[in-house]
Image (cartoon, grey):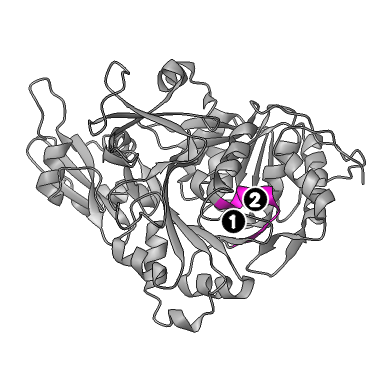
């Protein structure tokens, strides 16, 4: 086997594992049972990288991936890294116009998609202002070529590995640039969690990998340490338990709605899930009865708090404190520093509320094509999260108000401004505010409070259908409330706390 030079990059993980543990199983497709060892994964990575190179992909070029949790996702992720290029995982729950915006913004050399997502990918490319040079159905025509070099492009820790698009605070998403070093240090954080991760661990990746939580918390760290990743495209509670049993899963990440659904499986105890060591949740608080359910099964239950810009390994509420410190989001991971600062970026005393700021080697490189937004977010050497928080004397952090009004539904981050922007396009809507309402299944659902123009008329069903045609279904409001006017202060600022209190019974944006 030809040896590759040390690159410092993510592709080098597979190069080295192929030498150290070539016959160990790296990935498994749960649907088909097909698997690949680290040696096989290495060969596929090089062949796919050669195929992408043949399509003109070079260092720094983007490869957009409209792929579900499949071996192809992992294949194209690492092959892109092997070229020193940048992968752009696309949220396939978005609508075609939303995906078209990402294509126009990222300007990929290639868009790869799976046949299950063909309609979305093709519609998005057709609607893009600047279509990419190459669009490939990787199920029909895998992008592979002979590679006799056995060589991956050297990269530095500071080179960009991924662009992950966040929901937009002003109606347009931003591309957060994640470096190779970020992923390595994120793996370092994870290998020290609750007994650590090792090559004997097995995880099930069923939460969507286009999110930093599902990709970063366990999937990438397991491939770093030489463990096994079982990939499942869609979530079904009984199917998940069957996967736990069949593959002897030891660690797993799901969002709260998934854990809640899993706890309600009537014949849960029929499945042998004794191999499980610890499980993780993130994206929103998990209800305490759900946490206790899994702890009673002998599992350690952990909650992670993270963000696309800083990674999933930001704050951790461990099993020993998850009940006693419920309502907090835990303490920093090993390689994360935090502070709570006032409007002048001066640290406030313990217990006082201020903005949560963070620093460490998992800080993102910036927003793609947005230098001013990058400078604002990273000023003073700290990443400014925008979350209002307080920290107690023991270092546990409580989020008091959420980042720029963000709503979390089923693990998806939704910014009201993005939904409001769509509703404003309806000619009958004169004013609108979107808030989150507590929901037992999804954590939160969206409520739109609408002022209709004096000469107009529209129904709740019409506005919901109008939204559904323009944005991802998980962003569509479940309720429309019509009012004469929205509450504002003397300067015209919208008072969303008053709306939350009136329509949900809670003024706070974050509840458990």
Q: Is residue 222 part of the magenta span, yes or no?
A: yes
Q: Residue at x 54, y 45 (%)?
A: 123
In this orientation, does residue 89 appear? no
Q: Is residue 255 part of the magenta span, yes or no?
A: no
- Which residue is at the front of the view, 134 or 150? 150
Please indicate whether residue 287 sits to the left or right of residue 75 in the image.
left
Residue 360, how many percent across, how many down? 51, 29
Among all residues in the image, which is located at the extreme front? Answer: 393
* Quarter of the rendering containing residue 406: top left
Q: Residue at x 30, y 66 (%)?
A: 289
- Which residue is at the front of the view, 483 or 311? 311
Q: Residue at x 52, y 50 (%)?
A: 193
Please indicate whether residue 145 sits to the left or right of residue 188 in the image.
right
Label ID, residue 73: 2
Are there few (<14), some (14-19), or many (20+) residues within 10 Å of tag 1? many
Callout 1: SS = loop
Label ID, residue 374: none
* Quarter of the rendering containing residue 135: top right
* Quarter of the rendering containing residue 107: top right
Per the rendered image, the range of residues in magenta is 218-231
Are there few (<14), some (14-19), or many (20+) residues within 10 Å of tag 2? many
Residue 241, how many percent across, how many down? 51, 73
Residue 18, how many percent across, how many down? 81, 50
Please indicate whether residue 42 sits to the left or right of residue 133 in the image.
right
- Gap between marks 1 and 2 measured at Cα: 6 Å
Please indicate whether residue 229 sits to the left or right of residue 175 in the image.
right
Circle 1/circle 2 CB separation < 8 Å: yes
Callout 2: SS = helix
- Which residue is at the front of the view, 459 or 331? 331
Residue that carries the numbered disc 1 in the rendered image: 69
Residue 464, how many percent across, how many down? 27, 50
């Amino acid at each position: 086997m030809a040896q590759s030079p040390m690159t410092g990059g993510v592709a080098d993980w597979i190069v080295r594992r192929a030498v150290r543990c070539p016959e160990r199983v790296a990935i498994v497709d749960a649907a088909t049972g097909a698997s690949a060892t680290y040696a096989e994964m290495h060969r596929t990575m090089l062949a796919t990288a050669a195929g992408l190179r043949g399509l003109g992909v070079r260092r720094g070029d983007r490869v957009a991936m409209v792929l579900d949790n499949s071996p192809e996702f992992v294949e194209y992720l690492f092959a892109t890294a092997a070229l020193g290029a940048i992968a752009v995982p696309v949220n396939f729950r978005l609508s075609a116009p939303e995906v078209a915006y990402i294509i126009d913004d990222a300007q990929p050399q290639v868009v790869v998609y799976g046949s299950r997502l063909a309609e979305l990918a093709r519609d998005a490319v057709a609607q893009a202002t600047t279509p990419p040079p190459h669009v490939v159905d990787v199920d029909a025509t895998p992008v592979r070529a002979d590679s006799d070099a056995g060589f991956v492009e050297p990269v530095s820790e500071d080179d960009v590995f991924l662009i992950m698009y966040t929901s937009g605070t002003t109606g347009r998403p931003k591309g957060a640039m994640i470096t190779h070093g970020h992923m390595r240090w994120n793996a370092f954080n994870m290998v020290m969690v609750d007994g650590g991760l090792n090559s004997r661990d097995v995880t099930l990746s069923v939460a969507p990998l286009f999110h930093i939580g599902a990709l970063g918390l366990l999937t990438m760290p397991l491939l770093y340490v030489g463990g096994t990743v079982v990939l499942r495209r869609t979530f079904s509670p009984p199917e998940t338990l069957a996967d736990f049993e069949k593959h002897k899963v030891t660690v797993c990440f799901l969002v709260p709605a998934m854990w809640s659904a899993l706890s309600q499986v009537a014949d849960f105890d029929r499945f042998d899930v004794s191999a499980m060591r610890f499980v993780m949740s993130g994206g929103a608080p998990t209800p305490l009865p759900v946490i206790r359910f899994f702890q009673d099964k002998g599992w350690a239950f952990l909650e992670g708090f993270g963000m696309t810009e800083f990674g999933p390994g930001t704050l951790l509420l461990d099993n020993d404190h998850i009940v006693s410190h419920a309502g907090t989001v835990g303490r920093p991971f090993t390689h994360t520093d935090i502070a709570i600062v006032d409007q002048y970026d001066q640290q406030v005393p313990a217990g006082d509320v201020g903005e949560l700021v963070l620093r460490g080697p998992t800080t993102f490189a910036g927003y793609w094509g947005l230098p001013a937004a990058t400078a604002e977010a990273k000023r003073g050497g700290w990443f400014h999260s925008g979350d209002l928080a307080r920290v107690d004397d023991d270092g546990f952090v409580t989020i008091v108000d959420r980042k720029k009004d963000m709503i979390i539904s089923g693990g998806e981050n939704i910014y009201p401004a993005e939904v409001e922007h769509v509703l404003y396009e309806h000619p009958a809507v004169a004013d609108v505010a979107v808030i989150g309402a507590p929901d037992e299944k999804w954590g939160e659902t969206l409520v739109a409070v609408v002022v209709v123009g004096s000469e107009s008329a529209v129904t709740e069903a019409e506005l919901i259908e109008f939204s559904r045609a323009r944005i991802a279904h998980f962003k569509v409001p479940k309720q429309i409330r019509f009012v004469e006017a929205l509450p504002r202060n003397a300067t015209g600022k919208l008072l969303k706390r008053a709306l939350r209190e009136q329509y949900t019974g809670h003024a706070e944006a974050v509840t458990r």
